[in-house]
Image (cartoon, rainbow, N blue to C red):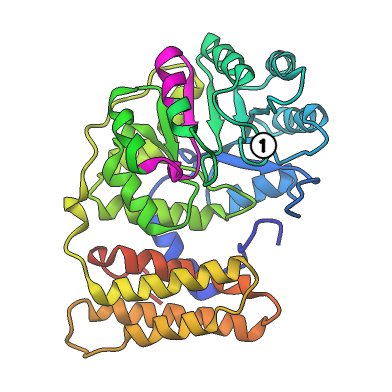
Amino acid sequence: MPIDNSDFDPRLLGVLRAETDAIGDGLWFDAHTHIGFNDPDGRRATASEIIGGLDAAGQHRALVFAMHEPDGYAPANDRVLDAAQRSDGRLLALARISPHHDDAVAEARRCLRAGARGFKLHPRSDAFALPHPAVEHVVAIAAEGRMPVLFHAGRGIPHLGEAVVDLARRHPDARLILAHAGISDLSWIAAAAHDLPNLFFDTSWWMVSDLLALFTMVPPARILYASDMPYGPGLMSAFLFLRVSGAVGLGEAARREIAGAQLARLMDGEPARELGPAPGPAGIGARVIATERVMSYAATAVQLAFRGADPTEALALARVACRGRSDAPLADVLGFLDVTLAIAMEAFARQPERPAAIIPAALVAVTVAGTPHTGVPPAAM
Protein backbone atom coordinates (compact mmCIF):
# COMPACT_ATOMS: atom_id res chain seq x y z
CA MET A 1 0.00 0.00 0.00
CA PRO A 2 1.29 3.54 -0.70
CA ILE A 3 0.63 4.57 2.91
CA ASP A 4 1.81 1.86 5.30
CA ASN A 5 -0.93 -0.18 6.98
CA SER A 6 -3.73 1.87 5.47
CA ASP A 7 -5.62 -1.28 4.38
CA PHE A 8 -8.02 -1.20 7.31
CA ASP A 9 -10.35 -4.07 8.04
CA PRO A 10 -13.88 -2.68 7.43
CA ARG A 11 -14.79 -3.48 11.03
CA LEU A 12 -12.17 -0.96 12.20
CA LEU A 13 -13.27 1.93 10.02
CA GLY A 14 -16.32 2.82 12.06
CA VAL A 15 -14.27 2.80 15.24
CA LEU A 16 -11.66 5.11 13.75
CA ARG A 17 -14.04 7.50 12.03
CA ALA A 18 -16.31 7.87 15.04
CA GLU A 19 -13.45 9.71 16.75
CA THR A 20 -12.00 11.63 13.82
CA ASP A 21 -15.20 12.87 12.17
CA ALA A 22 -15.85 15.11 15.18
CA ILE A 23 -13.28 17.60 13.80
CA GLY A 24 -14.13 19.15 10.45
CA ASP A 25 -11.94 18.16 7.51
CA GLY A 26 -11.14 21.75 6.67
CA LEU A 27 -9.34 22.18 10.00
CA TRP A 28 -6.97 19.20 9.99
CA PHE A 29 -3.36 20.21 9.22
CA ASP A 30 -0.75 17.45 9.38
CA ALA A 31 2.68 18.69 10.54
CA HIS A 32 4.73 15.74 9.27
CA THR A 33 4.59 13.93 5.89
CA HIS A 34 7.22 12.80 3.37
CA ILE A 35 7.60 12.17 -0.34
CA GLY A 36 10.53 10.50 -2.10
CA PHE A 37 11.85 7.47 -3.94
CA ASN A 38 15.42 6.79 -2.79
CA ASP A 39 15.24 6.25 0.97
CA PRO A 40 17.43 3.29 1.97
CA ASP A 41 14.63 1.97 4.18
CA GLY A 42 12.64 1.13 1.04
CA ARG A 43 9.66 3.42 1.64
CA ARG A 44 8.27 5.37 -1.31
CA ALA A 45 5.59 8.04 -1.59
CA THR A 46 4.36 10.47 -4.21
CA ALA A 47 2.57 13.73 -3.57
CA SER A 48 -0.65 12.24 -4.94
CA GLU A 49 -0.36 9.37 -2.47
CA ILE A 50 0.06 11.80 0.43
CA ILE A 51 -2.98 13.77 -0.73
CA GLY A 52 -4.83 10.48 -1.07
CA GLY A 53 -3.87 9.68 2.52
CA LEU A 54 -5.24 13.04 3.63
CA ASP A 55 -8.48 12.38 1.76
CA ALA A 56 -8.82 8.91 3.27
CA ALA A 57 -8.51 10.45 6.73
CA GLY A 58 -10.90 13.32 5.98
CA GLN A 59 -8.06 15.82 6.34
CA HIS A 60 -7.15 18.93 4.41
CA ARG A 61 -3.50 20.10 4.51
CA ALA A 62 -0.02 18.88 5.40
CA LEU A 63 3.56 20.00 5.67
CA VAL A 64 5.65 17.84 3.34
CA PHE A 65 9.38 17.28 2.90
CA ALA A 66 11.83 14.87 1.29
CA MET A 67 12.63 11.42 2.54
CA HIS A 68 16.26 10.49 3.10
CA GLU A 69 18.38 11.13 0.00
CA PRO A 70 21.90 9.72 0.46
CA ASP A 71 23.19 11.64 -2.58
CA GLY A 72 21.95 15.08 -1.53
CA TYR A 73 18.74 17.04 -1.22
CA ALA A 74 18.65 19.71 -3.94
CA PRO A 75 16.77 17.62 -6.57
CA ALA A 76 14.50 16.14 -3.89
CA ASN A 77 13.73 19.58 -2.51
CA ASP A 78 12.83 20.73 -6.01
CA ARG A 79 10.38 17.82 -6.34
CA VAL A 80 8.78 18.72 -3.01
CA LEU A 81 8.54 22.40 -3.97
CA ASP A 82 6.96 21.50 -7.31
CA ALA A 83 4.49 19.17 -5.60
CA ALA A 84 3.47 21.89 -3.17
CA GLN A 85 2.99 24.40 -5.97
CA ARG A 86 0.72 21.95 -7.82
CA SER A 87 -1.36 20.97 -4.77
CA ASP A 88 -3.83 23.89 -4.65
CA GLY A 89 -2.59 24.78 -1.20
CA ARG A 90 -2.95 21.32 0.32
CA LEU A 91 0.79 20.70 0.68
CA LEU A 92 3.26 23.22 2.15
CA ALA A 93 6.92 22.46 1.51
CA LEU A 94 9.70 22.21 4.07
CA ALA A 95 13.21 22.05 2.61
CA ARG A 96 15.27 19.16 3.94
CA ILE A 97 18.81 20.22 4.75
CA SER A 98 21.86 18.11 5.54
CA PRO A 99 24.47 20.11 7.46
CA HIS A 100 27.19 17.86 6.03
CA HIS A 101 26.90 19.49 2.63
CA ASP A 102 29.15 22.50 2.07
CA ASP A 103 26.21 24.33 0.49
CA ALA A 104 23.71 23.60 3.27
CA VAL A 105 23.02 27.24 4.13
CA ALA A 106 22.92 28.25 0.47
CA GLU A 107 20.45 25.41 -0.19
CA ALA A 108 18.25 26.64 2.65
CA ARG A 109 18.13 30.14 1.20
CA ARG A 110 17.61 28.84 -2.35
CA CYS A 111 14.62 26.80 -1.25
CA LEU A 112 13.08 29.73 0.59
CA ARG A 113 13.30 31.82 -2.59
CA ALA A 114 11.58 28.97 -4.44
CA GLY A 115 8.69 28.80 -1.99
CA ALA A 116 9.75 26.62 0.96
CA ARG A 117 7.95 27.45 4.22
CA GLY A 118 10.57 26.13 6.64
CA PHE A 119 13.05 23.30 7.11
CA LYS A 120 13.38 19.64 8.11
CA LEU A 121 16.51 18.33 9.85
CA HIS A 122 17.15 14.63 10.54
CA PRO A 123 20.22 14.16 12.77
CA ARG A 124 19.96 10.38 12.71
CA SER A 125 19.54 9.49 9.02
CA ASP A 126 21.79 12.35 7.88
CA ALA A 127 24.31 11.45 10.61
CA PHE A 128 25.14 14.78 12.20
CA ALA A 129 25.56 15.75 15.82
CA LEU A 130 24.23 18.75 17.68
CA PRO A 131 25.11 21.49 18.17
CA HIS A 132 26.26 22.12 14.59
CA PRO A 133 27.20 25.46 12.98
CA ALA A 134 25.12 24.84 9.84
CA VAL A 135 22.07 24.04 11.98
CA GLU A 136 22.63 27.30 13.83
CA HIS A 137 22.52 29.16 10.49
CA VAL A 138 19.41 27.32 9.32
CA VAL A 139 17.54 28.12 12.54
CA ALA A 140 18.62 31.76 12.28
CA ILE A 141 17.24 31.88 8.72
CA ALA A 142 13.96 30.38 9.95
CA ALA A 143 13.80 33.00 12.68
CA GLU A 144 14.04 35.77 10.07
CA GLY A 145 10.71 34.61 8.62
CA ARG A 146 9.11 33.20 11.80
CA MET A 147 9.21 29.78 10.15
CA PRO A 148 9.30 26.22 11.50
CA VAL A 149 12.27 23.88 11.76
CA LEU A 150 11.18 20.27 12.27
CA PHE A 151 13.74 18.01 13.99
CA HIS A 152 13.53 14.25 13.91
CA ALA A 153 13.50 13.32 17.60
CA GLY A 154 13.67 9.55 17.81
CA ARG A 155 16.25 7.54 19.69
CA GLY A 156 20.01 7.65 19.25
CA ILE A 157 20.58 11.40 18.90
CA PRO A 158 22.93 12.63 21.65
CA HIS A 159 22.35 16.17 22.94
CA LEU A 160 19.33 16.78 20.71
CA GLY A 161 17.14 18.12 23.49
CA GLU A 162 19.77 20.34 25.03
CA ALA A 163 20.71 21.76 21.63
CA VAL A 164 17.12 22.45 20.57
CA VAL A 165 16.26 24.15 23.88
CA ASP A 166 19.35 26.31 23.50
CA LEU A 167 18.39 27.19 19.92
CA ALA A 168 14.84 28.02 20.99
CA ARG A 169 16.12 30.39 23.67
CA ARG A 170 18.53 32.18 21.35
CA HIS A 171 16.19 32.34 18.33
CA PRO A 172 12.75 33.13 19.79
CA ASP A 173 11.22 33.88 16.37
CA ALA A 174 12.00 30.41 15.01
CA ARG A 175 9.36 27.72 15.61
CA LEU A 176 11.20 24.55 16.57
CA ILE A 177 9.25 21.29 16.40
CA LEU A 178 10.42 18.00 17.88
CA ALA A 179 8.92 15.16 15.86
CA HIS A 180 7.67 11.83 17.22
CA ALA A 181 6.47 13.30 20.53
CA GLY A 182 10.05 14.23 21.35
CA ILE A 183 10.54 10.73 22.75
CA SER A 184 14.31 11.00 22.77
CA ASP A 185 14.15 13.74 25.43
CA LEU A 186 10.55 13.92 26.60
CA SER A 187 11.27 12.81 30.17
CA TRP A 188 13.06 16.09 30.91
CA ILE A 189 12.45 18.53 28.07
CA ALA A 190 8.71 18.88 28.69
CA ALA A 191 9.47 21.38 31.46
CA ALA A 192 11.17 23.66 28.92
CA ALA A 193 7.98 23.76 26.86
CA HIS A 194 6.26 25.62 29.69
CA ASP A 195 8.79 28.46 29.36
CA LEU A 196 9.52 28.48 25.61
CA PRO A 197 6.59 29.61 23.43
CA ASN A 198 8.49 28.61 20.28
CA LEU A 199 9.17 24.95 21.23
CA PHE A 200 6.63 22.41 19.92
CA PHE A 201 6.13 18.65 19.74
CA ASP A 202 4.35 16.73 17.00
CA THR A 203 2.26 13.62 17.62
CA SER A 204 3.73 11.35 14.91
CA TRP A 205 4.20 8.35 17.18
CA TRP A 206 2.31 5.17 17.97
CA MET A 207 3.14 4.10 21.53
CA VAL A 208 0.21 5.17 23.70
CA SER A 209 2.30 5.45 26.88
CA ASP A 210 4.59 7.99 25.19
CA LEU A 211 1.62 9.96 23.89
CA LEU A 212 0.01 9.93 27.34
CA ALA A 213 3.26 11.34 28.72
CA LEU A 214 3.29 14.04 26.03
CA PHE A 215 -0.29 15.12 26.62
CA THR A 216 -0.01 15.14 30.40
CA MET A 217 3.40 16.85 30.60
CA VAL A 218 3.34 19.40 27.76
CA PRO A 219 0.92 22.35 27.51
CA PRO A 220 -1.60 21.72 24.71
CA ALA A 221 -0.52 24.91 22.92
CA ARG A 222 2.84 23.24 22.25
CA ILE A 223 1.44 20.08 20.61
CA LEU A 224 0.79 19.71 16.86
CA TYR A 225 -1.03 16.84 15.17
CA ALA A 226 1.12 14.79 12.76
CA SER A 227 0.91 11.43 10.99
CA ASP A 228 4.38 10.63 9.57
CA MET A 229 2.84 9.50 6.25
CA PRO A 230 3.73 7.26 4.46
CA TYR A 231 5.02 5.52 7.60
CA GLY A 232 1.60 5.73 9.23
CA PRO A 233 -1.90 6.46 7.93
CA GLY A 234 -3.53 9.72 8.91
CA LEU A 235 -6.74 8.04 10.05
CA MET A 236 -4.91 5.94 12.64
CA SER A 237 -2.74 8.87 13.72
CA ALA A 238 -5.82 11.03 14.23
CA PHE A 239 -7.52 8.27 16.25
CA LEU A 240 -4.47 7.99 18.52
CA PHE A 241 -4.30 11.74 19.07
CA LEU A 242 -8.01 12.15 19.79
CA ARG A 243 -8.28 9.11 22.04
CA VAL A 244 -5.26 10.10 24.15
CA SER A 245 -6.09 13.80 24.34
CA GLY A 246 -9.60 12.90 25.43
CA ALA A 247 -8.26 10.52 28.06
CA VAL A 248 -6.27 13.31 29.74
CA GLY A 249 -9.27 15.64 29.75
CA LEU A 250 -8.53 18.09 26.94
CA GLY A 251 -11.66 19.85 25.71
CA GLU A 252 -12.90 20.29 22.17
CA ALA A 253 -11.37 23.75 21.73
CA ALA A 254 -7.86 22.56 22.62
CA ARG A 255 -8.18 19.48 20.46
CA ARG A 256 -9.22 21.54 17.46
CA GLU A 257 -6.18 23.74 17.96
CA ILE A 258 -3.89 20.70 18.05
CA ALA A 259 -5.61 19.14 15.03
CA GLY A 260 -4.64 22.04 12.81
CA ALA A 261 -5.67 25.52 13.90
CA GLN A 262 -2.45 26.13 15.83
CA LEU A 263 -0.22 25.00 12.97
CA ALA A 264 -2.17 27.18 10.53
CA ARG A 265 -1.55 30.13 12.84
CA LEU A 266 2.17 29.37 13.02
CA MET A 267 2.48 29.02 9.26
CA ASP A 268 0.89 32.44 8.90
CA GLY A 269 3.67 33.88 11.09
CA GLU A 270 1.39 34.49 14.05
CA PRO A 271 2.22 33.64 17.67
CA ALA A 272 0.82 30.45 19.15
CA ARG A 273 -2.48 30.72 20.97
CA GLU A 274 -2.12 29.76 24.63
CA LEU A 275 -4.46 26.98 25.76
CA GLY A 276 -3.75 26.60 29.43
CA PRO A 277 -1.37 24.39 31.41
CA ALA A 278 -0.51 20.76 30.87
CA PRO A 279 -3.26 18.70 32.50
CA GLY A 280 -0.98 16.40 34.47
CA PRO A 281 -1.63 12.69 35.00
CA ALA A 282 -4.75 13.01 37.15
CA GLY A 283 -7.13 12.85 34.22
CA ILE A 284 -5.93 9.42 33.13
CA GLY A 285 -7.57 7.70 36.10
CA ALA A 286 -6.40 4.79 38.21
CA ARG A 287 -4.25 2.08 36.70
CA VAL A 288 -6.13 -0.95 35.41
CA ILE A 289 -3.82 -3.94 35.54
CA ALA A 290 -5.99 -6.05 33.23
CA THR A 291 -5.88 -3.54 30.40
CA GLU A 292 -2.21 -2.75 31.03
CA ARG A 293 -1.43 -6.42 30.42
CA VAL A 294 -3.31 -6.27 27.15
CA MET A 295 -1.51 -3.08 26.18
CA SER A 296 1.92 -4.56 26.93
CA TYR A 297 1.41 -7.73 24.90
CA ALA A 298 -0.32 -5.93 22.01
CA ALA A 299 2.50 -3.38 21.86
CA THR A 300 5.01 -6.24 21.79
CA ALA A 301 3.10 -7.72 18.86
CA VAL A 302 3.27 -4.40 17.01
CA GLN A 303 7.03 -4.18 17.60
CA LEU A 304 7.52 -7.72 16.28
CA ALA A 305 5.37 -6.99 13.25
CA PHE A 306 7.30 -3.80 12.48
CA ARG A 307 10.42 -5.98 12.27
CA GLY A 308 8.81 -8.68 10.13
CA ALA A 309 8.67 -11.26 12.94
CA ASP A 310 5.81 -13.57 13.88
CA PRO A 311 3.52 -11.70 16.33
CA THR A 312 1.06 -14.51 17.06
CA GLU A 313 2.34 -15.50 20.50
CA ALA A 314 2.19 -11.91 21.76
CA LEU A 315 -1.29 -11.50 20.28
CA ALA A 316 -2.43 -14.73 21.91
CA LEU A 317 -1.13 -13.57 25.30
CA ALA A 318 -2.93 -10.25 24.83
CA ARG A 319 -6.19 -12.09 24.14
CA VAL A 320 -5.75 -14.31 27.20
CA ALA A 321 -5.33 -11.13 29.27
CA CYS A 322 -8.78 -10.00 28.05
CA ARG A 323 -10.55 -12.93 29.66
CA GLY A 324 -12.27 -12.48 33.00
CA ARG A 325 -15.62 -12.33 34.70
CA SER A 326 -18.39 -10.64 32.76
CA ASP A 327 -19.12 -8.36 35.73
CA ALA A 328 -15.50 -7.27 36.16
CA PRO A 329 -14.68 -3.54 36.02
CA LEU A 330 -14.28 -2.44 32.42
CA ALA A 331 -15.50 -5.81 31.14
CA ASP A 332 -16.93 -4.04 28.09
CA VAL A 333 -13.50 -2.61 27.26
CA LEU A 334 -11.86 -6.02 27.65
CA GLY A 335 -14.51 -7.54 25.38
CA PHE A 336 -13.83 -4.87 22.75
CA LEU A 337 -10.10 -5.52 23.01
CA ASP A 338 -10.58 -9.26 22.51
CA VAL A 339 -12.59 -8.68 19.33
CA THR A 340 -9.99 -6.21 18.03
CA LEU A 341 -7.13 -8.61 18.70
CA ALA A 342 -9.06 -11.38 16.96
CA ILE A 343 -9.18 -9.14 13.88
CA ALA A 344 -5.40 -8.75 14.10
CA MET A 345 -4.93 -12.53 14.29
CA GLU A 346 -7.25 -13.03 11.31
CA ALA A 347 -5.18 -10.54 9.32
CA PHE A 348 -2.00 -12.49 10.03
CA ALA A 349 -3.69 -15.80 9.17
CA ARG A 350 -4.62 -14.37 5.77
CA GLN A 351 -1.14 -12.92 5.13
CA PRO A 352 1.44 -14.85 7.18
CA GLU A 353 4.15 -13.55 4.87
CA ARG A 354 3.26 -9.98 5.94
CA PRO A 355 3.29 -9.60 9.74
CA ALA A 356 2.57 -5.87 9.41
CA ALA A 357 -0.99 -6.80 8.43
CA ILE A 358 -1.79 -7.01 12.16
CA ILE A 359 -0.76 -3.44 12.89
CA PRO A 360 -4.01 -1.50 12.35
CA ALA A 361 -6.08 -3.72 14.65
CA ALA A 362 -3.26 -4.22 17.14
CA LEU A 363 -2.69 -0.45 17.36
CA VAL A 364 -6.37 0.14 18.05
CA ALA A 365 -6.05 -2.40 20.86
CA VAL A 366 -2.92 -0.75 22.25
CA THR A 367 -4.63 2.64 22.22
CA VAL A 368 -7.90 1.57 23.83
CA ALA A 369 -6.09 -0.59 26.40
CA GLY A 370 -3.92 2.39 27.32
CA THR A 371 -6.96 4.65 27.81
CA PRO A 372 -9.47 2.30 29.47
CA HIS A 373 -11.40 4.91 31.44
CA THR A 374 -12.43 6.57 28.17
CA GLY A 375 -14.52 3.45 27.56
CA VAL A 376 -15.40 1.56 24.43
CA PRO A 377 -15.16 3.66 21.25
CA PRO A 378 -18.56 5.07 20.32
CA ALA A 379 -18.86 2.98 17.16
CA ALA A 380 -17.87 -0.35 18.66
CA MET A 381 -17.77 -3.34 16.31
Which quadrant is home to the N terminus?
A: bottom right
Residue in the foreground of this view, choosing between 132 and 183: 132
Say if residue 21 shows up in the picture: no
Residue for point 64% across, 32% down: 128
Q: Is residue 16 above or below residue 51?
A: below
Residue 341 is at least partly visible in this image: yes
Instruction: Provide residue 104's location: percent of width, then percent of height.
Output: 72, 20
Image location (x, y in percent) of residue 258: 39, 38
> In the image, is residue 269 above or below residue 91?
above
Which is nearer the eye, 339 or 299? Answer: 299
Q: Residue at x 28, y 26 (%)?
A: 274
The vertical placement of 71 against 314, above or below, is above
Query: In what quadrant of the picture does the C terminus appear?
Result: bottom left
Classify residue 276 by image quadrant.
Answer: top left
Residue under numbered circle 1? 127
Give the left or right position of residue 95, taking residue 171 as reference.
right
Few, some or many C-alpha atoms within 10 Å of disc 1 (few <14, some 14-19, many ≥20)? few
16 to 139, vertically: above or below? below
Q: Which quadrant of the structure image shows residue 84? A: top right
Bounds of the magenta segment: 165-186
Q: Residue at x 60, y 79 (%)?
A: 310
Please, which residue is most extreme toward the bottom here? 325
**Relative side of 66 to 381, left or right:** right
User: Is 217 or 53 nearer to us in this picture?
Assistant: 217
Q: Residue at x 54, y 73 (%)?
A: 10
Task: State yes or no: residue 181 in magenta.
Answer: yes
Q: Amino acid at mark 1?
A: Ala
**Where does residue 248 sit, x and y in percent of width and height?**
25, 51
Secondary structure state at the residue bearing disc 1: loop
* Magenta span includes 227: no
Report the side of 16 relative to 308 (left or right): left
Q: Which one is nearer the viewer's eye here, 116 or 102?
A: 102
